[in-house]
Image (cartoon, grey):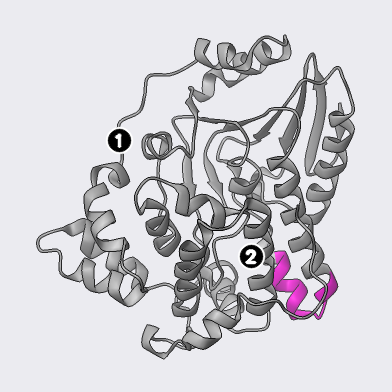
């Protein structure tokens, strides 16, 4: 077994096993982990004895809670701009490489899966959710955007559920994830070792997963409120979405959803809404390239640093967004953020 302090690699029969090994940090991805995973997956792609790859987290609380956002924040604050963009480029390159990988990838997802954790799991063909599964793309709450290919993914979810997830950052459980297609299979966390043993023997992946399938979990709020979400989130602007939610009489869900959106970065909300509008017309590599372009603009702004400060550094959960109101967001600036930067851009194809 190849091992580092942060990610472990093991050949087990027919499978290559990746174990994210930062449980105290909810297995958040560092640049070292990203580079090690990319190199190991290249090696396994050329190894005829490896017929499938499995990715899992350690510690029981999280599959992967995302990229190491605090490290990016610190790099920016100390002037390590090259390091900051190395992390973004490396993460997006890994996500794109996993999406086009020539061997099937099975993600065993126990616990939290957010941000970069979504990126290294959701674009593969097999996403197995445990009873502890908790998905979110919470970036608008820290002045950022849904990324790692979710510009492509979220608009393709049923109805307008993807826009709901993008604008709220709310968590959903395994029932909603299976209904929306974010997860493909359900299994008990206690059965994950048996799933690994079955996959290591080299049999058909679908057969192994079916043999260890757990009963379908009950639907969550996204499925139960699908009609409300479609009626409200089909609007063409964040302000119109909020007006629709405010107009729903007697719905605690609508009221809570509106409150959540109003707590998010107005700039991030407008960027995310535009991502959802454009995403259906983009390929996955184009979507990732768009996200990288947006990142270069966001890193020059205010809200990301303020959001990370409020949520992850000082933890006062009182970000002072600039601007503070949706009506003060410059629509022209939002649209221009999607345009080429004029500098050479990475190719994620």
70 up-or-down from 118: above or below: below
Q: In percent of the image, x 81 and y 76: which residue is there? A: 81
Residue 276: x percent and y percent? 47, 62
Where does the N terminus fall, quadrant-wise?
Answer: top right
Please indicate whether residue 104 sits to the left or right of residue 9 in the image: left
Disc 2 crowd, CA 10 A, few/some/many (<14, 14-19, 20+): many
Residue 12: x percent and y percent? 79, 17
Q: In the image, which disc is placed on residue 291? A: 2
* Type of secondary structure dominating the magenta stretch: helix
Looking at the rendered structure, the secondary structure element under dot 2 is helix
Looking at the rendered structure, the secondary structure element under dot 1 is loop
Disc 1 crowd, CA 10 A, few/some/many (<14, 14-19, 20+): some
Q: Which residue matches tag 1?
A: 219
Please indicate whether residue 183 sits to the left or right of residue 48 in the image: left
Q: In percent of the image, x 38 and y 45: which residue is there? A: 158
* Residue 234 in sight: yes
Label 2 to label 1: alpha-carbon separation:
31 Å
Which numbered mark, 2 or 1, is in the foreground of this view?
A: 2
Q: Quadrant of residue 44?
A: top right
Camera-nearest residue between 193 and 203: 203
Q: In percent of the image, x 62 and y 17: which residue is there? A: 205
Q: Quadrant of residue 84?
A: bottom right
Residue projecting furthest to the front: 281
205 up-or-down from 306: above or below: above
Q: Quadrant of residue 285?
A: bottom right
The stretch of residues the image draws in magenta is: 71-82
The disc, 2 or 1, on the residue closer to the chain's N-terminal end is 1
């Amino acid at each position: 077994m190849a091992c580092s302090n942060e990610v472990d690699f093991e050949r087990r029969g027919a499978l290559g096993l990746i174990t994210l090994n930062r449980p105290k940090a909810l297995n958040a991805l560092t640049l070292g982990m990203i580079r090690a995973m990319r190199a190991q997956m290249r090696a396994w792609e050329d190894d005829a004895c490896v017929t499938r790859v499995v990715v899992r987290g350690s510690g029981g609380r999280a599959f992967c809670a995302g990229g190491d956002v605090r490290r990016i924040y610190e790099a920016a604050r100390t002037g390590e701009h090259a390091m900051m963009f190395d992390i973004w480029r490396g993460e997006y390159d890994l996500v794109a490489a996993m999406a086009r990988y020539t061997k099937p990838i099975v993600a065993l997802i126990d616990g939290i899966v957010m941000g970069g954790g979504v990126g290294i799991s959701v674009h593969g063909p097999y996403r197995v959710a445990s009873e502890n599964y908790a998905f979110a793309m919470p970036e608008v709450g820290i002045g950022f955007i849904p990324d790692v290919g979710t510009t492509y993914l979220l608009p393709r979810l049923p109805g307008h559920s993807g826009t709901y997830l993008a604008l709220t950052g709310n968590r959903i459980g395994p029932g909603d994830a299976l209904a929306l297609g974010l997860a493909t299979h359900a299994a008990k966390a206690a059965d994950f070792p048996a799933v690994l043993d079955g996959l290591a023997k080299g049999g058909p992946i679908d057969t192994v997963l079916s043999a260890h399938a757990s009963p379908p979990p009950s639907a969550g709020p996204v499925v139960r409120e699908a009609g409300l979400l479609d009626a409200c989130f089909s609007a063409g602007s964040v302000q119109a979405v909020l007006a629709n939610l405010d107009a729903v009489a007697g719905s605690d869900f609508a009221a809570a959803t509106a409150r959540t959106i109003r707590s998010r970065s107005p700039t991030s909300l407008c960027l995310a809404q535009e991502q959802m509008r454009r995403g259906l017309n983009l390929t996955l590599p184009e979507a990732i390239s768009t996200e990288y372009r947006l990142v270069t603009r966001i890193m020059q702004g205010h809200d990301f640093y303020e959001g990370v400060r409020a949520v992850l550094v000082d933890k006062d959960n009182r970000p002072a967004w600039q601007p503070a109101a949706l009506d003060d967001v410059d629509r022209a600036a939002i649209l221009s953020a999607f345009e080429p930067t004029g500098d050479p851009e990475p190719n994620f194809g």
